[in-house]
Amino acid sequence: MRAGRERTSRAACETMPRDWFRKTDKAISRIPAVFAGCAVADNNLKSLTRLFPIVGPYKWGIYSGFATFFVARFFEVGSYFAVSMGIDRINVMINDDAKPIDYSLTQIALLIVGCVLMRFVFVVHARRAIRRAGIHVSFDLRQKLYATVQRQGSDFFSRIGVGDIMTRAIQDISLIMRLVSHGLIQVVIMIYAPIFGLGAMLFKSPMLTLLILPLLPVLFIYAYNMAGAMARTSLAVQQNLSALSQHTQENLSGIRTIQAQAQEDNEIARFLVTNNAYADAFYDQARISSLMGAWTPFFASCAQLVILVYGGYLVLENQISVGDLVFFFACLNMLLQPIRMAGFFITTVQRAVVATDRLFEIFDAEPEIIDNPKPEVPALIRGEFELRHLNFTYPRSHRAALTDINLHIRAGESVAIVGRVGSGKSTLLKQFTRMVDTQAGQLFLDGHDIRDYPLAQLRSQIAQVLQDPFLFGEPLYHNISYDDPGRALDRIWDSADAAALRETITEFPAQMETVVGERGVTLSGGQKQRTTLARGLIRNAPVLILDDCFSSVDTETEEHILGRLKALRANMTTILVSHRVSTLRHADRIIVLDDGRIVEIGTHEELMRKDGIYAELERVQTQGGASHSSKGVAELDD
């Protein structure tokens, strides 16, 4: 396998560790360490108890499966008993014994068929009931995970990447579903089979049964010690799979940048390192699983050898019949069935433990924005904002993003915000929709603390067009009318016209039905910005926030959009960020930020008379010159 990967990319594979298969030489030498014992913490099954509230609604289906499995075991033992009767009946016929015959071969055959059919019916019902519960559990976990992620903020996604979340949503939940659907069935087998098998064996020959019991503690000690090693390797596999998914997702998202920079070979080499780490972890898990799969049949064979030797002796001494010995072997198979599946069961449980811990790491994450609305807030927002000494610092940052912001925005007013890179413009906009958490008593909306509003109301009545235009891989009309797909097509065309997008759409063969591809890959930067602008305008919200959404639009188109915007939103609040003076001068007031503080505020004419940062920016853009009085003015673009 290693040689094949080297042939795939010889240059990239030079970074691969050279000991890929050397680990196989060490496998035997590490066996004693496996038996030496593992920390109990590695085999902590308490994590699975956290699944009880999720499994609870489907407990009766599981109980039903347990009950029918119990009945199925009666018929299974009955079929073995009928087979032993048939063997003894045939033995009597062959030896012409004069023993009385209670049942004919026909009756015995019908009994066997009846037992097998009844066992089939009950087993099918039991497996369907338990596996249905597993499917429901996985469905609920996936819904819970998706709902939890939807309410998280930027700090959460800085800790857990999108690729990692996708791995947990698919792979980890599948492992838990496997535990419920298959693991519970294995539990039933591991409980019922020894009970029925051991009971029947004791009934036939207590002495013969006692000879194989010493093997059971050996098996338990072996399985217990192997469980810890399996837990560690399972965790390593899941972590490396998450890293692999994260690497793949980021790489494919930036594939155009990679190709533009001619970094394909370097990325292949980097991916090979990540892929190799996952393969190494998976190899370790497979090695331990293989050891378990090899040793458990050995224990089973030892028990069968004891039965064969001593049971054969009892047959020769006429203490038991041939049918009894065959019945004993069949029951022994039931008793040893848990031994054969012990390795698979331990693997299933330990991987589910790891998966559960990883899922609840997300479930336990507190939302960064706490939604605790008050009933006294108005149902309709007018759009009047008041900021009182507002301060904000991002988590794990020692530098304040906003400092002592005092600002009053009247309802129906248009306000523009400008400032250097990192001056806090986008951070300030996030305060208005609580995309970041605002401290109590610092930001008021229509006279009420913004924290008192329900988040759903706040974000549905404040339309925000983000700086990075994101489009779904859906038709244009779906992207424009994303919040309400049932809107009339005329309204969608009107919003497209307001965003100067109508002419562009009519050039497409499918027009509004045009599928824009993932993240709008088929559209230019300006077309994507205008599409997201149309998505914001169609909502006709009381407050519209535009975060530098004209940066990829030419000035002529921008003037057209601003003219329509002013007409459409004459009496509604509009807050926009831009680095173009041609955009800023249309606002009623302009706010200049610098290092997280408001340094200038006023109309275009007032700021020009102040001859400060804004005036310098106007001169740079209109005259193409630069000034020594405003350092870094050219860096105003966000």
Image (tube, rainbow, N blue to C red):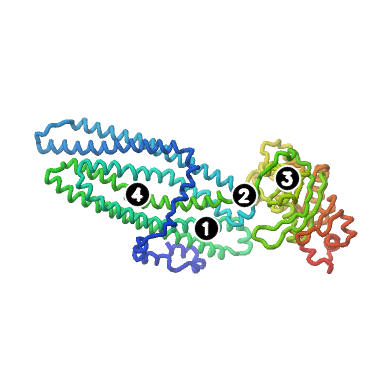
Q: Earlier in the sequence, mark 2 or mark 3?
A: 2
Give the Cα distance between marks 3 and 1: 37 Å
Tag 3 residue = 463
Q: Label 4 sits on what residue type? A: Met
Instruction: Specify few, some or many for label 3: CA neighbours under 10 Å numbering under 14, 14-19, or 20 or more.
Output: many
The answer, for residue 285, to whether it is visible in the render is no
Tag 1 residue = 244
Instruction: Specify few, some or many for label 2: CA neighbours under 10 Å numbering under 14, 14-19, or 20 or more.
Output: some
Q: Residue at x 55, y 65 (%)?
A: 265
Q: Earlier in the sequence, mark 3 or mark 4?
A: 4
Tag 4 residue = 341
Q: Label 1 sits on what residue type? A: Leu
Q: Earlier in the sequence, mark 4 or mark 1?
A: 1
Q: Position of residue 31 (x, y in %)?
A: 35, 62
Residue 135 higher or lower than 339, as above or below: above
Q: Find numbered disc 1 in the image and state the secondary structure of the residue it sits on.
A: helix
Residue 511 higher or lower than 219, as above or below: above
Tag 2 residue = 367
Give the Cα distance between marks 2 and 3: 22 Å
Q: Nearer the viewer, residue 625 or 460?
A: 460
Mark closer to the observer (4, 1)? 4
Q: Earlier in the sequence, mark 3 or mark 1?
A: 1
Q: Find numbered disc 4 in the image and state the secondary structure of the residue it sits on.
A: helix
Q: Label 2 sits on what residue type? A: Pro
Q: Find numbered disc 3 in the image and state the secondary structure of the residue it sits on.
A: strand
Answer with the quarter of the image where residue 318 lies.
Answer: top left
